[in-house]
Structures are given as structure tokens and as C-alpha cells.
Amino acid sequence: MTTSVQTAQDATAGTGPGTGLDAERSPERLIGLFAEESRVRAFAAVALGAASPAEVAELAGLTAKGAATALLRLREHGVVTSGADGEPTVAYDLFRELARTARPRPAADDPGTGDERTDMVLRTFVREGRLVRLPARWNRRELVLRHIAEQTFVPGIAYPERVVDEKLGAWCEDGEVDHVSLRRYLVDLRQLSRSEGVYRRLA
């Protein structure tokens, strides 16, 4: 048993992250790697502190050959490496890197698309029915102003300026924008029309 384990250990030396196959370290390939129960058991044993193939076999409930084969595959994929003392150890840095690279990253100028993007913008600039501030970017500003118009005014209804100011004043409490500026922005971005002191929401 000792000879079999030692042979497998020698065969897997030098197959850590520096020399393994990077192409096999994608999240999809790792899912396939852990589809085999013996590899999951061996990996768990290493994570729990098994310091040798023999300990891996004992802790994982595998034969010496089964443990050696599982460790070989785990090393080939780089998820298990050798520590300074030669003991098998989990390559946690690899998992952290895979988590970073697999996470979707929106473009710098676009926090998302569709409803996701709208929700993110609104959560940033509108809180508990109050306008915190207006975005500097016009496309985001338009989203916020459209939201305020849709939540405040009904299409087809004529609103005198006094009523418009009262409704917008509620949005501006404790915010950085006053109701007069907000009213002007709504008109400028064609969320509201204005004629002879009467305002209407543009559908």
C-alpha cells in the first residue's frame, strides 16, 4: 500500500498551478472534475487537513489507489497543490480567481441593461420616495426624471403650477435639488409640458 501511494505521489509532483493545464481550470471544467465522488471526498479530506495521500485515503474512505488517482486529477486541475513541506493543500487562490473572472462585469459607462440598469440607477438616486440628488449623466438623469413624472403625474390631467410645486416639493425634502429646479428639468427633458402656467405629463 505504501509503495502504491508513494508512486502516485511522485507522479503528481510538480503539477501545481504553475505547471497544470490552465485550459482545464475554467468553472465548467471544475464542475466536471467534481462530478466524480472520489474526487470530492479526496478534496474534502485535503481541505480538512489530511497531510498525506495515506491520510486522504483514510479520511475520505477510499482505497490507497483510489485516493492516489483522485489526488492526481485534483493536482492536474490545480485545485490541490503541494505546500512548502510537500503536503497536499487546497489552492484557494485559484477558486478566488475563478470567482472574480466568472462574475459578470458591466461596462464602466453602463451599470447594466434594461430593468436591471434602471433599478440600479433608481436605488442610487431615489430613496424612500425622496430624490437624493440628480445624476450628472444625462441618460441616468432622464431615467430618474421619467420615474418621478410617472409616479407623480397622470397623463391627460392639467396641473396648475402651484400643485406641481407641491407635488415636487415632497420629492425634494432633505435632498440636494429644489422643486423649482426639478420642475425645470422635467420640462427641459420633455417629461412635462408647460403652457400658460399649466403643466401636463407627456405620455
Image: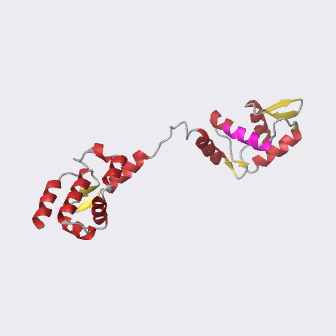
Residue 156 picture quarter: top right
Asked where in the image residue 133 lies, by quadrant, the reply is top right
Above/below status of 36 relative to 110:
below
Residue at 12%, 62% in the rendered image: 4
Residue 186 place in picture, x, y as percent: 76, 35
Q: Image check: 170 left or right of 105?
A: right
Q: Is residue 149 magenta?
A: yes
Q: Residue 48 appears at what percent x and percent y?
A: 31, 67
- Magenta stretch: residue 137 in it? no
**Residue at image x 27%, y 50%?**
77
Does any portion of residue 82 appear in the rendered image? Answer: no
Location of residue 8 by image quarter: bottom left
The residue at the point 76 percent across, 38 percent down is 181
Q: Which quadrant does the N terminus fall into?
A: bottom left
Of residue 175 and residue 189, the one placed in the foreground of this image is 189
- Residue 28 in the image: state x and y as whole percent: 36, 47
Instruction: Give the percent coordinates (x, y) of residue 32.
Output: 33, 51
Q: Would you place residue 142 above or below residue 92 in this image?
A: above
Q: Which residues are magenta?
A: 143-152
